[in-house]
Image (tube, helix red, strand yellow):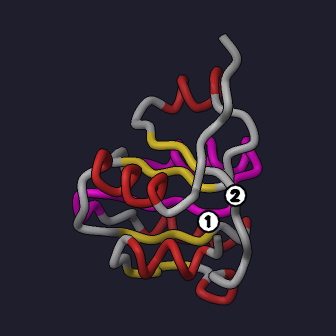
Amino acid sequence: MTIDEIKELLDAEVLCCKENVGNTVDSACGCDLMSDVLAYVKDQAVLLTGLVNPQVVRTAVMMDMVCIVFVRSKSPSEEMLKLAEDNGIVIMKTDMRLYEACGILYSNGLIGEVTKA
């Protein structure tokens, strides 16, 4: 799935790095605890979150993520957008809640990490 397809599915607004919306992604996660993202998330290209602070972008950079979607109409600061721009991370926002946004992406084929029992 491309980032542009995610934008369309979530009726999202691209705030940063519009030139990268053609990039393909094959996994995503939804989380507001960046410590959980660091501890448990592996190989996820898209982060959906309602947490709006610079640590979100720094976490995405450390985890090699290519896109952050802020839910519930949350808007990142100029500092966050600059940090994302410097690292080529697409930033979007949607009016949807986290649960709804994750469900839509999952039902359209964007998976999360496969865990083994």
Query: To which residue does mark 2 refer?
Result: 26
Q: Is residue 12 magenta?
A: no
Q: Amino acid at mark 2?
A: Asp
Residue drawn at x 73%, y 71% as measured from the top left: 24
Q: Quadrant of residue 37?
A: top right
The span picked out in magenta is: 53-74
Q: Is residue 72 magenta?
A: yes
Q: Horizontal and vertical percent for residue 95?
A: 23, 67
For the residues marked 2 and 1, what is the alpha-carbon distance in whole angstroms? Answer: 20 Å
Q: Horizontal and vertical percent for residue 17?
A: 62, 81
Viewer-closest of 54 and 98: 98
Residue drawn at x 52%, y 46% as measured from the top left: 56
Q: Horizontal and vertical percent for residue 98?
A: 31, 48
Element type at marker 2? Answer: loop
Left or right position of 76 against 65:
left
Residue drawn at x 41%, y 74% as measured from the top left: 9
Element type at marker 1? Answer: helix
Relative to residue 8, is residue 82 depicted above or below?
above
Viewer-nearest of discs 2 and 1: 2
Q: Quadrant of residue 10?
A: bottom left
Query: To which residue does mark 1 refer?
Result: 84
- Say the numbered circle drawn on residue 58: none
Q: Amino acid at mark 1?
A: Ala
Q: Horizontal and vertical percent for residue 29?
A: 53, 43
Asked if disc 2 and disc 1 are in contact, CB closer than 8 Å, the reply is: no
